[in-house]
Image: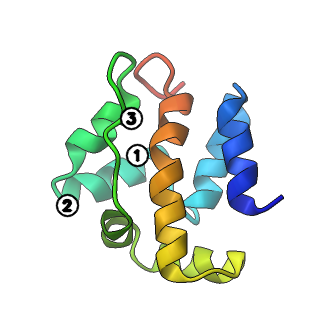
């Protein structure tokens, strides 16, 4: 099972503690507060707010936004996973909204 498949499987579970660890792994050391700050700096706070909010659909993010927000962390993760930076950014973009949504079930981090 690949790193991203493992995250997807945990997102489908309700293991919030495990998911918080996966968030840190997925973003190469960032916590939710740091991710929010990076997205805020890019004017993408509405996206993160939708992932955190309990009653909203998650607004998707793009690989380009992930690369802009996470910078060299995407490259580091790509190297660890043995995939291209573009592929890593897309996988993070596909995974991050659902992951944050699951670790903030009541609209806030537990």
Residue found at x 72% / y 29%: 13
Disc 3 crowd rating (10 Å Cα; few below 14, some 14-19, many 20+) is many
Sequence-earlier tag: 1 or 3: 1
State the image coordinates of residue 31 (x, y, percent, origin top left): 51, 50
74 in relation to 44, above or below: below
Residue found at x 21% / y 40%: 46
Left or right of 59 on screen, residue 26: right
63 in relation to 40, above or below: below
**Label 1 element class:** helix
State the image coordinates of residue 19 (x, y, percent, origin top left): 66, 40
Q: Nearer the viewer, residue 29 or 12?
A: 12
Left or right of 79 on screen, residue 60: left
Task: For marks 1 and 3, give the CA distance.
Answer: 13 Å
State the image coordinates of residue 92 (x, y, percent, origin top left): 51, 59
Q: Which residue is mark 3?
A: 51
Q: Which residue is mark 1?
A: 33
**Label 3 element class:** helix
**Label 2 element class:** loop
Q: Which mark is residue 2?
A: none
Q: Please tell me in which quadrant of the rendered image residue 4 appears.
A: bottom right
Q: Nearer the viewer, residue 18 or 91?
A: 91
Q: Which residue is mark 2?
A: 42
């Amino acid at each position: 099972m690949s790193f991203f498949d493992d995250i997807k499987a945990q997102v489908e579970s309700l293991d919030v503690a495990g998911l918080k660890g996966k968030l840190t792994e997925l973003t190469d050391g960032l916590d939710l507060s740091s991710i929010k700050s990076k997205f805020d700096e890019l004017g993408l706070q509405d996206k993160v707010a939708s992932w955190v909010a309990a009653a909203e659909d998650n607004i998707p993010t793009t690989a380009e936004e992930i690369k802009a927000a996470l910078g060299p962390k995407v490259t580091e993760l790509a190297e660890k996973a043995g995939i291209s930076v573009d592929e890593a950014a897309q996988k993070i973009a596909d995974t991050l909204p659902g992951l944050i949504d699951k670790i903030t079930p009541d609209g806030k981090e537990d």
